[in-house]
Image (cartoon, helix red, strand yellow):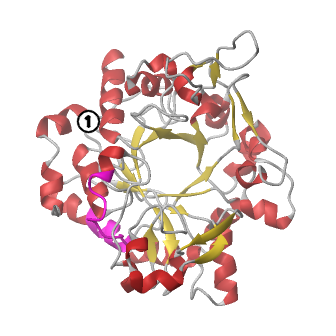
Amino acid sequence: MNLSLNVIASLVAATLLAACGGSNTNNVTPATPVNTLATLDGKAPLVLAHRGASAYFPEETLEAYTLAIAMGVDVIEPDLVLTKDGVLVARHDVTLSASTDVANHPEFASRKRAGENGDGEAVAADWFTADFTLAELKTLRARSPNHDAAKRYNDQFKIATFQEILDLIKLKASENGRTVGIYPETKNPSYHLALTKSGALPVRLEDALFKAIKDNNLNSKDAPIFVQSFEPGSLKYLRQIGSLTKQIQLIDAYDVDFKTGKMIYGTAPGNLVYSQPTDWKLAGDTRLFDGMLTPAGLAEIKAYADGIGAWKPMLIPVKCALDAAGACKDVDGDASFNGYADSTMQAPTSVVADAHKAGLFVHVYTFRNEKGYYNQPFDAKGDASVELQAFYALGVDGVFSDSPDTALKARSSYLSSLGK
């Protein structure tokens, strides 16, 4: 079944739109102004549709973004990679097998090759976006790598360009009178830069993004756009070439130590893939992401960015209960320890308060409705809104959610509990 954008938009009931509301933050058109909250600006936290409404339709497609807009989100988020002919497209990975039907296209069988995943990890064999022109990618169809509900729509929707997503926002703004923000990520910028320097790509990723920003009249601090990256060099370069948009430094870690509730920032070669920015590693800089969460690190970020994008356990740690042997207990009864699903939320860290003190807003990733290793904590008891409201109460300025309707409802409930 092929669904038109109009049909998809109509899937969300008008009552949901009324219940969800909006925010009055960062020049995203508000539904209801809210003041004096614990956020940096005292206004309602943003709900950010992570790769669109990706729990319901294959991620990064126009259909997923259309559904998210219809739900009433404040901002939609695409990850950006480059095609062989220099076009920005929305894909989370530089490889294609997990999120498209490329394996079903015999005409592209010879394109499968070894390479790396953009973060320095070896890929034995896959198809790479940078080996395909936009016209070739448009013959593929998107698949969901994560959500069972979204997988029902596999192989139906096309890969979207960044410009198509921007055009969708403009269309919906003209139809609804409400502006939705855009939150692009420069995906694996060091990887893309190496391809540009080798001649495999005709343009630098950031240069292509900055051109799109200017062409769409978004190059101002007040424009409804946030540009994010895990690599500081990417954000600094954008500033150097004249970008005035709000910028966000994303912060990662190798894993969570569920026994202690602490983050793991590994020093072994393999662990460094997610323990430090790729551009730092390539430059021989031995610092890890954890330094960004200190007051000194936050002050350094403030010089080139306006906010941070933090992983959930950096703000509210989770910890398991230990058995007599010192191992994490299976408390949800599924016969195995499963990370978040068998762990409970602990006292918050000082990161939000420290970031706000430094003048940085805090957006947090990623909230999902399903149980799973990094999804809901055990003490949410299957209700994703429990976890979300804990973060709203902490004062985060925005939440990334694969199910943005749930995040919107949780925000509405939280604001109602405060009499807002």
Q: Quadrant of residue 260?
A: top right
Query: SS at mark 1?
Result: loop
Please state which of residues 78 and 100 is positioned toward the viewer in this rendering.
Answer: 100
* Residue plotted at (12% across, 40% down): 14
Residue 166 in magenta stretch:
yes
Quadrant including the C terminus: top left
Most foreground residue, 52 or 249 = 52
Picture mark count: 1
Q: Position of residue 325 (x, y in %)?
A: 76, 14
Task: Give coordinates of residue 60: x percent, y percent.
Answer: 38, 60
Where residue 56 appears, x then y in whole percent?
A: 30, 47
Reading the image, the residue beneath label 1 is 21
Quick one: 246 or 262, which is closer to the camera? Answer: 262
Residue 143, magenta (yes or no): no
- Left or right of 84? Residue 114 is right
Q: Residue at x 40, y 82 (%)?
A: 106
Residue 159 image offset from top left, x and y in percent: 36, 70
Label 1: few (<14), some or many (≥20) within 10 Å? some
Residue 240: in sight, yes or no? no
Instruction: Give, as a three-letter code, the residue at label 1.
Output: Gly
Q: Is 136 located above or below residue 101 in the figure?
A: below
Farthest top residue in view: 324
Look at 74% across and 48% down and name the residue there. Answer: 275
**Residues drawn in magenta:** 151-169
Left or right of 250? Residue 141 is: left
Q: Quadrant of the N terminus?
A: bottom left
Q: Is residue 167 above or below residue 355?
A: below
